[in-house]
Image (tube, helix red, strand yellow):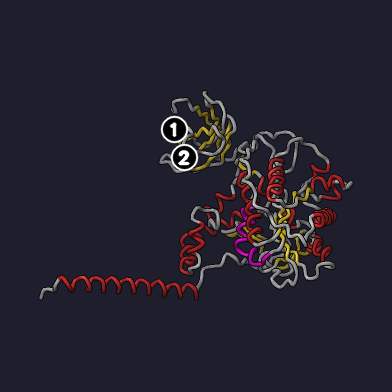
Amino acid sequence: MAVSPELKTPIRWSRRWSALALGVGVLVTWEVICRIFPAPDPRVPAGVPAQETITLEGDPWLLWQLRPGDRVEHGKPVHVNPNGFRDRDDGAAASGLRVMTVGDSSVYGFGVGDDEVFSSVIEKIYAPELPGIHVINGATPGWSTFQTLNMLDMRGWALAPDLLIVGNLWSDNNFDDFVDSELLTSYAGFRQTSEYRARVVFSHSALFRWLDYQIRVEPRKSAAQKVGWTLGGDGPRSGRRRVAINDYADNLDTLCARMRERNGGVVFVMLANREDVNPVSPDPAWGPYRRVMQQAAERNGVPLVDLPTVFRESGRSEDALFMDQMHPTAAGHTLIASAVEQALKAAGWPQQRLVPVHPEPHPVYADRFENRAGNVQSSVSADPRGEPAAMPGTAPQPPPVQQNGAFAVDVSVPDYVTGDLLLEVLTEDGAVLTTATLPVPGVARLGAVHTARVRLRLTLDVGRDGAGGSDEVRELGPLNIGAGGEIPAVFSANGR
């Protein structure tokens, strides 16, 4: 029997609604299941205590983090709480003001005991006049501002700090064989991808979190764990900073903005090293990053503690202040705590909350040390094991011995006038293998790539403002790089 046209439309709509209801029911069912059996929570460290070493574990959201527990590091007692902070508790139960310090191994307190770190000393100083104050040591050896921001997003902001003491410097400006933003995006991209805003919304769903972990994070977890143990060690240094100078400026402004949103204060602490007590180099590689921090403090209207000046004017010897090239001794930490206290009192804290103002955009910074691997002295930094990755010096070091498969590109541009040269090394089908930026034509030293033939693409960034639509692009190749070595690359005016 034929169905009249008048009845067909209601039947079709009924089927569609049934299918939609079934689909919604399936999603709701899976959402409930994923809430009962959730994906690992990135806010919770997963490890168990270990003894006699700075113990770190890989983490795809932070690259590495402190493993909770009690242990002895370099003969000193260390307690790491369940949040992964070097602190007696997580600060949630603090009855008074909460202060958090962030940074790398110098802020963490490499080589000194729990009660000798400047964060602990500050708490002792203020305890009589500010009962219940709690200073949380949120630093981790080797952490950059990217890792610090991720930690705050994951678990730090939940503690509602009233004051953030920012000591991130050495790891950000360090030259290494990886770049933090690229590695974080590759492993998990907790906050560094362009999809971040959408991910914040979808992350409320347990099903989304479970799928995201299984599809994107779990396959890369073992690689992330490896990075935690090899920072500053295995790969050839690329000549790139771990955090590019403009990213560093962005991150410092972001830290201020996040505290401003919470009506909290910020203090920047410019870290010191031995060369500040007995200057040798007139223009060290960490100088540009110090200037960025100084200007960030000025733009955001917050105090800056100038430790290089404090240490130099203390009259104490290098050995009294530093146990190696850049890690403060217990006496050095006491001096830091005193300098921070004086800066806070001069600024009227805590009556004045030191909330950052809305700053003008930071200028576009040029870092002349970037991408000069082998031709510039590496900055002082610490690897996850707490050891200095490089010592400050004055003379440029000779080019490093190329590891097997590593290669260099001698970039020549006959019609070069001005601007940065943005070099990309591509596979034959166009996938980007590695990049470098040269301020003038010259040799770009690159790490090993797992291919014998590559293409080269050069962007002439005349305005030194990054690749844009008006910048000229030239290509060469495919070229045979074999087992490595130095490749001459002449980018002629016609792009051939």
Q: Rate crowding at label 1 as few (under 14), some (14 to 19) or many (20 or more) other CA atoms within 10 Å.
A: some
Magenta segment boundaries in residue numbering: 144-160
Image coordinates of residue 260 in percent, x first then y, are 65, 58
Image coordinates of residue 361 in percent, x first then y, are 61, 46
Q: What residue type is labelled 1?
A: Gly
Is 313 left or right of 371, judged from the image as shown?
right
Is 475 left or right of 153, judged from the image as shown?
left
Which residue is at a point 49% across and 74% down the rendered structure image? 35
Sequence order check: which comes first, mark 2 or mark 1? 2
Q: Is mark 2 on a helix, strand or loop?
A: strand
Residue 315 or 341: which is nearer the viewer?
A: 341
Which residue ends up furthest to the right in the rendered image? 315
Any part of residue 95 in sight: yes
Identify the residue position indicated by label 1 in the image: 477
Which residue is at a point 59% across and 47% down the rendered structure image? 178
344 lies above or below 485 = below
Q: Which amino acid does label 2 sit on?
A: Leu
The answer to if 159 sits in the magenta stretch is yes
Residue 347 or 286: which is nearer the viewer?
A: 347
- Circles 2 and 1, Cβ within 8 Å, touching? The answer is yes
Residue 168 or 62: which is nearer the viewer?
A: 168
Which residue is at a point 84% across and 67% down the rendered structure image? 129
The answer to if 112 sits in the magenta stretch is no
**Which SS type dominates the magenta stretch?**
helix
Instruction: Kindly indicate the quadrant of the structure image that contains residue 99.
Output: bottom right
259 lies above or below 277 = below
Identify the residue position indicated by label 2 in the image: 426
Which residue ends up furthest to the top in the rendered image? 414
Any part of residue 242 in sight: no
Instruction: Kindly indicate the quadrant of the structure image that contains residue 20.
Output: bottom left
